[in-house]
């Protein structure tokens, strides 16, 4: 097994932002039956104390005793830093390890722009927010009815649709006890979207929040705090959905289809019950790596490992590779 940039004399090969894969040449004993063996590749982060643990891994079939393969560098999980690519030859049925080889490398990656439920930090407050309605008397507007606790809740509910500068402003004021400041931020948020009638714009969003609360909340998580709720609020309802609650060998899952979603077209999003709560659904994978990519989605979805390779018996493989 050999990578295109093998380490030589302590030199660690470098993969720049425009390099999306690591070409490797794999050669195994021609006397081995290729149909009874698999290759597993894995990445490990050399900078972490748990550097011997796989960040993620994936199994590929062996077409011939000698073949070339491009191992994709997954920008969701591989950031700039020092890593190790591990190639393992295994028996297909028993998963017995027959041989292992690793390659050390460095990489520089562009900032991750994939879907994330975590608030991104931005400027403390945007220019638009500052200038939008500073001369308006808030006591005459709809925000005047909200006390401190309620206005904080309302602002938290804006996370799924807030732009990055607005998220930065929210991080800066959400723990404030200055009621006037919080009311003004909330009013400005809706004024910037509908100067003619900011209250009507908020009411339309509140209806969506109520829907998400009924459909997607679970445990202590409010509807807008869940993956399904966030995506629904940000992008609207999917064009089509399928649900699989009792498919053999899998956890319950659901697929949402969007014909258009921002810059994406024909996007499929996979949600699955990862935890123990029956109505919990977390984002697991998508059909477009620039939205969300999880190379371990199949191993996380399937409760029966043998069913993971039974691609003809599971609808999920109609939408995800």
Image (cartoon, rainbow, N blue to C red):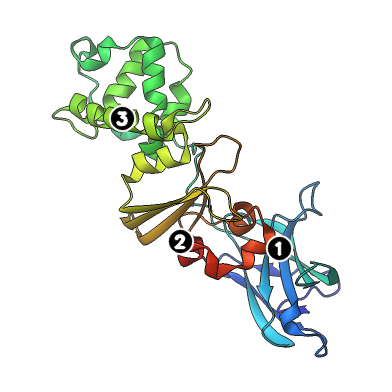
> In the displayed structure, would residue 256 be above or below residue 187?
below
- Image coordinates of residue 139 in percent, x first then y, are 22, 9
Q: Residue furthest left?
A: 196
Q: Residues within 10 Å of mark 1 (few under 14, many from 20)?
A: some
Residue depicted at x 70% and y 54%: 55
Quarter-of-image position of residue 142? top left
Q: CA distance from mark 2 to mark 1?
A: 25 Å
Q: CA distance from mark 1 to mark 3?
A: 41 Å
User: Does dot 1 land on a helix, a strand or a loop?
Assistant: strand
- Image coordinates of residue 90 in percent, x first then y, are 79, 71
Residue depicted at x 32% and y 17%: 183
Disc number at residue 145? Answer: none
Q: Which badge, 2 or 3, is on the more N-terminal residue? A: 3
Residue that carries the numbered disc 1 in the rendered image? 106
Residue that carries the numbered disc 2 in the rendered image? 288
Residue that carries the numbered disc 3 in the rendered image? 129
């Amino acid at each position: 097994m050999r990578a295109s940039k093998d380490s030589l004399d302590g030199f660690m090969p470098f993969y720049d932002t425009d390099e999306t894969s690591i070409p490797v040449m794999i050669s195994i004993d021609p006397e081995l039956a290729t149909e009874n063996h698999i290759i597993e590749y894995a990445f490990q982060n050399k900078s972490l104390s748990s550097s011997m643990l796989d960040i993620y891994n994936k199994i590929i079939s062996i077409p011939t005793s000698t073949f070339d393969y491009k191992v994709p560098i997954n920008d969701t999980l591989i950031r700039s830093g020092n890593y190790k690519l591990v190639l393992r030859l295994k028996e297909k049925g028993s998963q017995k390890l027959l041989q292992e080889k690793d390659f050390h490398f460095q990489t520089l990656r562009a900032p991750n722009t994939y879907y994330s439920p975590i608030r991104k930090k931005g400027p403390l407050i945007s220019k638009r927010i500052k200038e939008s309605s500073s001369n308006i008397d808030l006591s005459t507007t709809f925000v005047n009815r909200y006390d401190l606790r309620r206005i904080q809740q309302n602002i938290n509910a804006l996370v799924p649709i807030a732009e990055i500068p607005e998220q930065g402003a929210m991080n800066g004021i959400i723990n404030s006890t200055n009621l006037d400041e919080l009311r003004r931020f909330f009013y400005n948020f809706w004024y910037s979207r509908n100067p003619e009638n900011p209250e009507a714009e908020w009411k339309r969003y509140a209806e969506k929040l109520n829907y998400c609360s009924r459909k997607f909340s679970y445990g202590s998580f409010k509807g807008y705090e869940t993956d399904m709720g966030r995506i629904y609020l940000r992008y609207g309802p999917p064009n089509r959905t399928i649900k699989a609650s009792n498919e053999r060998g899998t956890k319950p899952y659901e697929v949402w289809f969007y014909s258009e979603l921002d810059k994406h077209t024909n996007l499929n999003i996979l949600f699955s019950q990862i935890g123990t709560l029956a109505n919990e659904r977390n984002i697991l994978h998508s059909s477009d790596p620039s939205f969300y990519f999880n190379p371990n989605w199949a191993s996380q979805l399937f409760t029966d490992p043998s069913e993971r390779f039974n691609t003809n018996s599971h609808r999920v493989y109609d939408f995800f590779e």
